[in-house]
Image (tube, rainbow, N blue to C red):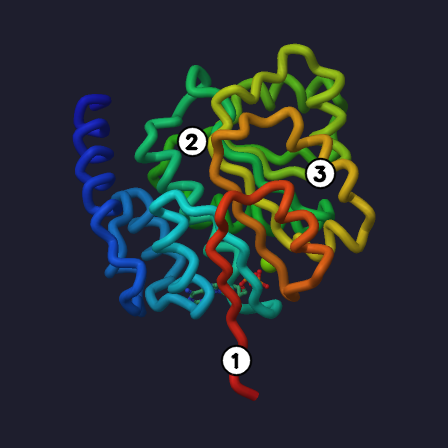
Amino acid sequence: KRKRDDVDANKLQEAVDQIDVKSTFTSFSELPLSAPTEEGLKSAHFSALTDIQAKAIPRALQGSDILGAAKTGSGKTLAFLLPVLENLYRAQCIGADAGLGAMIISPTRELAIQIFEVLRKVGGKGHLFAAGLVIGGKGLREERDALSRMNIVVCTPGRILQHLSQTSTFNVDNLRMLVLDEADRIMDMGFKKDVDAIIEYLPSDRQTMLFSATQTKRVSDLSRLALKEPEYISVHEAA
Ligand code: ADP
Ligand code: MG
């Protein structure tokens, strides 16, 4: 079974490398995605790409850093969750031995829970990733035990920093993707220091994606610290 998956992952990687990011994508079926992701999208009845998804996902699949801005309700969650699922899948970053592969930071517990629900809806069908929430709802020790088995964590800045600074066994050496959702709100809520501190713990050889509703100066302050030659993707709908 593992051998099959390796073959699939290699084939997918070839297809991803061949994506022409300049072409216009309209539906998920035009993208090289793993069978479990296709299954998840189908069961959630997602077929057409939103604008931000069409622009961000092809580039993110190829590993580019992304700075994406699009108004609330435009589908930013899948714009980063699909690349997280796919890039970890192709890297076979699956199971407890693989360690934590992706960290998704949200400004509030409520938003983190919403992201996690979308992750379960689209990724929970056929994917074998271990994913969890670290938002401070449970005891520190309980969260720590769960964290040690996760491939994908959806978290709030203060709580994940607490684990990074207090848990000597929390290993992030395999982390390859960092997502900041609602980056503008993360800044507005005064989490810049926490995010800067979190980044200090993470491998610098990683893919970073920032998404926000507005393209503020403060988001670009943050991005300067976190992004490498990012693709700037901004979607403005005609009024
Ligand atoms: P944002 O984070 O930009 O505010 P969300 O990711 O929360 O937006 O998505 C807003 C709504 O659009 C959600 O109800 C989601 O299920 C829906 N949605 C997202 N992508 C698609 C899509 N490709 N096709 C149909 N509905 C979608
Ligand atoms: Mg959102």
- Note whether 217 is above or below 82 in the view shown: below
Q: Amino acid at mark 2?
A: Phe
Task: Say which of 117 and 180 sits in front.
Answer: 180
Circle number at residue 52: none
Instruction: Please report whichever mark, 1 or 3, sits nearer to the chain's N-terminal start.
Output: 3
What distance separates the C-alpha of mark 1 from that of mark 3? 30 Å
Among numbered discs 2 and 3, the one appearing first in the sequence: 2
| Direction from residue 31 to residue 149 in the image, left or right | right
Label 2 SS:
loop
Residue closest to the eye, 19 or 157: 19
**CA–CA distance in space, label 2 to label 1:** 35 Å
Foreground tag (2 vs 1): 1
Q: CA distance from mark 2 to mark 3?
A: 25 Å
**Mark 1: few/some/many CA within 10 Å (<14, 14-19, 20+):** few
Q: Residue at x 46, y 65 (%)?
A: 52
Would residue 3 be found to the left or right of residue 162 on screen?
left
Which residue position holds label 2?
Answer: 129
Q: Residue at x 78, y 38 (%)?
A: 193
Q: Position of residue 138 (x, y in %)?
A: 74, 28
Which quarter of the figure has residue 30? bottom left
Q: Position of residue 129 (x, y in %)?
A: 42, 31
Q: Mark 1 is on which residue type?
A: Glu
Q: Is residue 177 above or below residue 67?
A: above
Residue 160 coordinates in the image, percent (x, y): 70, 30
Identify which amino acid the numbered label 3 is placed on.
Answer: Val
The residue labelled by disc 3 is 195
Task: Read off the residue under disc 1.
Answer: 237
- Ligand 2's image quarter is bottom right
The residue at the point 47 percent across, 48 percent down is 81
